Amino acid sequence: MPLDVHPPNSLGLPKPPAATRVVVAMSGGVDSSVVAAMLADAGYDVVGVTLQLYDHGAALARKGACCAGRDIHDARRVAETMGFPHYVLDYESTFRTAVIDEFADAYLAGATPVPCIRCNERVKFRELMDTARELGADCMATGHYIRREIGPSGPELHRAADPARDQSYFLFSTTPEQLAFLRFPLGGIASKAETRALAARYGLPVADKPDSQDICFVPNGDYRAVIEKLRPGAADPGEIVDMDGNVLGRHSGVIGYTVGQRKGLGIGGLGEPLYVVRLDVGARRVVVGPKSALATRTIPVAGINWLGDAPFTARPEWRALVRVRSTRAPAPALIRPRAPDSAEVELLSPEEGVSPGQACVFYEEGTTRVLGGGWIVRAG
């Protein structure tokens, strides 16, 4: 080995830890705090960065959301405890344009968006990574539960060691270029209890802090109130109809419904349970039907981010595991590429409640590797 080449450190970089600058994206929660503490304790040159993503004045008293005022304060306290610098960056304008506006427009179009994926893709892993490079960072670390492993063709994305904490569904859009710069120190952690034990060991003030639950800009999960504020007039009333177009009742706005919903329809006493099957936004209609009508086998997917080794279109058809909701396990499917960024996905066993706007994430059969994924769109 040449004398001027240092053996790789624990982050895979050919430098001693003290000469390796790591920007840690700190939300103020226990996960990212532990990552920052671990790296600082290992001797790395850690810089903590917290993003102010929205006007947090009204969120100071809220619990269960990330990046609010309290969380910024908690991130700063962790940095003080471990002795590394911490910065707060104002990304409100970017977040509004790249995430919140699309969230509202997607709901108005009858889709069920996943804003956390867009936030990772467009803000944390794009804008923040640019900032990390400007700060002279060699890499950026986050508190996500996912693994980055080096394969024959370079860095690969893999599911977390703890299936219950795995966040691969929310990170499928990470590009190969981003993956080269990112590190996920918690990917191999066996459980959240182990993470909290580490927080206690480091004496972090967030060791017992509850996990975030809500989308950060949606107080108490009330999507409707947020969309009505962003898009006045969005809650126009309309009809609830069955699959043959027969009127069964009225609703106070399509934005209050999602595909697969059963409760809160206000059309009881009609025999078998009815579910939201489709949202006809143009006609302001909520279409309902039996549970069997929710079963979907073929899914059009667009906007695909590909993380495999061979080109996405190299084969006309291939098997994989796919996940169509964050709460569901990956299931066998056939993937038929239609273009470098679109495909038809055939589920070998139909699934219920597949909705436009959700992600369809691809996994390699027999391994933990994430092959990318795309966005579910309407047929036709």
Image (cartoon, rainbow, N blue to C red):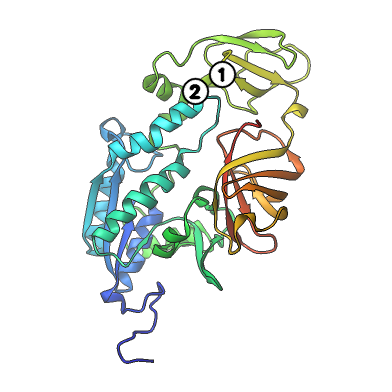
Q: For residue 188, say whether it is visible.
A: no
In the rendered image, which quarter is residue 258 located in? top right
Which amino acid type is marked by label 2? Leu
The percent coordinates of residue 79 (x first, y second) are 25, 58
**Position of residue 357 in the picture relative to residue 26 (left or right):** right
Circle on res. 281 = 1
Q: Are marks 1 and 2 in contact (CB under 8 Å)?
A: yes
Label 1 environment density (alpha carbons within 10 Å; few <14, some 14–19, many ≥20): some
Secondary structure under tag 2 reads helix
- Image height check: is 160 above or below 342? below
Q: Residue at x 78, y 15 (%)?
A: 271
- Image height check: is 313 above or below 210? below
Residue nearest the viewer, comparing 253 with 348: 348
Residue nearest the viewer, comparing 200 with 95: 95
Q: For residue 70, say whether it is visible.
A: yes
Circle on res. 108 = 2
Q: Give the distance between the C-alpha atoms of the residues marked 1 and 2, in whole angstroms.
A: 7 Å
- Image height check: is 279 above or below 355? above
Secondary structure under tag 1 reads loop
Compare marks 1 and 2 and give the one earlier in the sequence: 2
Q: Residue at x 40, y 37 (%)?
A: 99
Q: Quadrant of the N terminus?
A: bottom left
The percent coordinates of residue 124 (x first, y second) are 37, 49
